[in-house]
Image (spheres, rainbow, N blue to C red):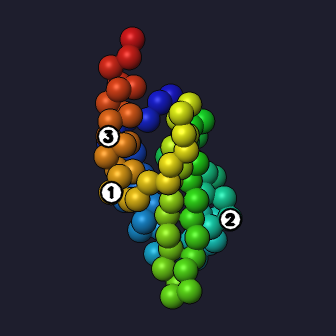
Amino acid sequence: MEWTIEEALETYEVFKWRVAEDPAFRALAIANPEAAVKELSGLNLPDQVELRVQEGDTGELELSILVVSPMAEQVYTEAELLEAARRAISATAVRP
């Protein structure tokens, strides 16, 4: 099963809430963010997407998403990620 834009956005919102409210989920998100996403959505991240979650000195979490393309690797900000996810999911949704 592939991601839809709605699933990606909903999972992102639930992910943010859970890391803020659930200490066990927060620990999982830091140790194994892909497993945390799968726990929420039941879906694996696409092969070209790597998720990193790090806890800063103030206790805030920083979420980084690496989208690997054949040409290069780039780290996206949260806003860039949402836009890239919208485009990627839209493109996937229209494939035959």
Where residue 82 appears, as percent x and y from the top left, is 34, 50
Where residue 91 appears, as percent x and y from the top left, is 35, 26
Pointers 1 and 3 in contact (CB under 8 A)? no
Q: Secondary structure at mark 1?
A: helix
Could you classify mark 2 by the number of other residues whose Cα lies within 10 Å: few (under 14), some (14-19), or many (20 or more)? Answer: some
Q: Is residue 37 visible?
A: no
Of residues 2 and 69, the one drawn nearer to the viewer in this rendering: 69
Of residues 12 and 90, the one drawn nearer to the viewer in this rendering: 90
Could you classify mark 1 by the number of other residues whose Cα lies within 10 Å: few (under 14), some (14-19), or many (20 or more)? Answer: few
Q: What amino acid is found at the position of numbered circle 1 in the picture?
A: Ala
From the image, tell me which residue sits under label 1.
79
Q: What amino acid is found at the position of numbered circle 3 in the picture?
A: Arg
Mark 1 / mark 3, whichever is N-terminal: 1
Mark 2 / mark 1, whichever is N-terminal: 2
From the image, tell me which residue sits under label 3.
86
Q: Is residue 28 left or right of residue 78?
A: right
Where residue 7 appears, as percent x and y from the top left, is 38, 43
Looking at the image, which residue is at 47% across and 30% down? 2
From the image, tell me which residue sits under label 2.
31
In the figure, 42 relative to 39: above or below? above
Q: CA distance from mark 2 to mark 1?
A: 23 Å
Q: Is residue 54 visible?
A: yes
Q: CA distance from mark 3 to mark 2?
A: 26 Å
Looking at the image, which residue is at 51% across and 88% down? 58
Of residues 76 and 49, the one drawn nearer to the viewer in this rendering: 76
